[in-house]
Amino acid sequence: MTRITVMVDGVSYVDDVEPRTLLVHYLRDKLGKTGTVVGCDTSNCGACTVHLDGRSVKSCSVFAVQVDGSEITTIEGLARDGQLHPMQQAFHDNHALQCGYCTPGMIMQAIDLLGDNPDPDEQTVREGLEGNLCRCTGYQNIVRAVLDAAEKMKPAVRAQQQPSTVVGGGI
Amino acid sequence: MIPSAFDYVAPTTVDEAIQALSQAGDDAKILAGGQSLVPVLRLRLAAPTMLVDLNKISELRGVRDDGNVIVVGAMTTHHDVINDPLIREHAALLALATQTIGDPQIRHRGTLGGALVHADPAGDLLAPAVALDAEMVIVGPGGRRTVPASEFFVDLFTTAVQPDEVLIEIRIPKKTGWGAHYEKFQRVAQAWSIVAVAAAVRTEGGSIAEARVALTNMAATPVHATGVEQALVGQPATAETIRAAAEHAAEGTSPMSDGNADPDYREHLARVLTQRAVASAAGLAA
Ligand SMILES: Cc1cc2nc3c(=O)[nH]c(=O)nc-3n(C[C@H](O)[C@H](O)[C@H](O)COP(=O)(O)OP(=O)(O)OC[C@H]3O[C@@H](n4cnc5c(N)ncnc54)[C@H](O)[C@@H]3O)c2cc1C
Ligand code: FES
Ligand code: FES
């Protein structure tokens, strides 16, 4: 067992973990953060995507021991005071999910992508989501949702809205 | 899905890493970005008893200018390679090839050193390393040595790096002002290369003054396409000369057969993709 100290969704945790424990299993089994899901055995699907020190990673290909001293944001850490993150809201508004299994990873990756490029075109969105697979939607509404969120998260638009801290989005 | 148990150390210097590797013996493995190793461990295709994580060794990250060469730390991530101004200016081919790897999440974790030592024949950074005449700096209990890319790749998944050694940096001679292109043929996005071609070309007054071409996944190790290079140098940079030179692309290759392609098809791809890669590198529409 190795002791780690890690900040997850704004809360600090100290835990003893086996070195072979994957970050995704630590989040789900130890912290109960089952919003982050496992969709494959090959690191292809992206369903397990979280932010590690501000960058998107697949939490099935990082060991929990490696995040000692780091900050993790999961899908469960996005909403503020009962208000959905603009990306979550955009997925809701645009009907960007069917079964919803890919959604946590899609949303985390979409937020990362807007951090790199707050004003992407459709092609940039599609390429930015190439590591996230969806078996249901055919991606059309997912792409629409991300473009919608980008529009709403632009600083000028946001200034007119009620201020609340959100993660990512180049803000 | 769960790897077998192992011990874990995260040294902060290269010396400590080498010590840990020596003490643990043959069953220790280096952990870099983990984007190849963790999937392998999860499937239990390997079961090392100790992982030596290089992520806390800050001296292994970053890119610096060293006169005629740029020096890339082995732990520099794919993401950082793509966005590094020195690499974009002096080794654009490496940035272009790295951009085609996997997906953004993989590129945030995966490292240049890890991709080279992993030495998957379909890996996209091996051919650019050969085309750019990169040199690998390796440190072990016996000290430091430098191995040229042409001798670094020994076989499938096998390099000159020994189990108790660490690849610390990659030295790339500057190719400032060269045109570059990496032409990758894959079945779907986020997939490995079926075949790919790395090309860098320096033109002078409409002629090809120097050319470097290497092929991905046309043999167990990257293939340096010298026949193509010889047919290009000194010729006018036109679609016809490039098409003629690209006919040499499959020479000296030994492509394998798998579910994606048989050897004949791979040879065809090598010629077509070489033509496209060189034309783009020379500034012509492919
Ligand atoms: C879904 C997916 C898609 C991918 N697609 C592509 C692709 O299209 N093209 C491509 O080229 N790659 C692809 N990759 C692989 C990716 O490029 C990896 O980052 C790379 O192969 C390994 O780098 P790493 O830093 O993650 O190394 P690790 O996985 O940590 O290590 C790989 C091997 O190298 C050894 N090693 C690592 N660093 C050193 C060092 N400094 N010194 C000595 N030994 C070392 C390790 O012991 C291990 O054996 C993909 C991976 C995934 C999961
Ligand atoms: S579960 Fe991590 S990529 Fe599929
Ligand atoms: S909504 Fe079902 S996998 Fe995407």
Image (cartoon, rainbow, N blue to C red):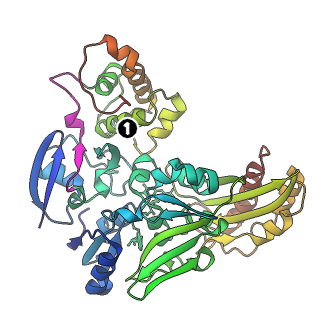
Span colored in magenta: A68-84
Q: Out of A164 and B192, give the one closest to the viewer.
A: A164
Residue A77 belongs to the span the image colors magenta: yes
Q: Residue furthest front?
A: B67
A64 vs A157, left or right, is left
Q: Residue at x 15, y 23 (%)?
A: A81
Specify the quadrant of the image occupied by residue B124: bottom right
The vertical placement of A60 against B149, above or below, is above
Q: Position of residue B237 (x, y in %)?
A: 86, 53
Q: Residue at x 20, y 56 (%)?
A: A68
Q: Residue at x 44, y 46 (%)?
A: B104
Quadrant for ligand 3 reads top left
What's under tag 1, amino acid-wise? Asp
B209 vs A90, left or right, is right
Residue B186: in sight, yes or no? Answer: no
B56 vs B226, left or right, is left
Q: Which residue is mark 1?
A: A112
Q: Position of residue B75 (x, y in %)?
A: 41, 63
Residue B60 belongs to the span the image colors magenta: no
Say few, some or many: other residues with alpha carbon within 10 Å of mark 1 (under 14 / 14 to 19 / 20 or more). Answer: many
SS for tag 1?
A: helix
The vertical placement of B279 against B123, above or below, is above
Q: Position of residue B62 (x, y in %)?
A: 45, 58
What secondary structure characterizes most of the magenta part? loop
Provide the chain ID for the residue under circle 1. A
Q: Out of B98 and B179, give the one closest to the viewer.
A: B179
Q: Residue at x 35, y 74 (%)?
A: B14
Residue A38: in sight, yes or no? Answer: yes
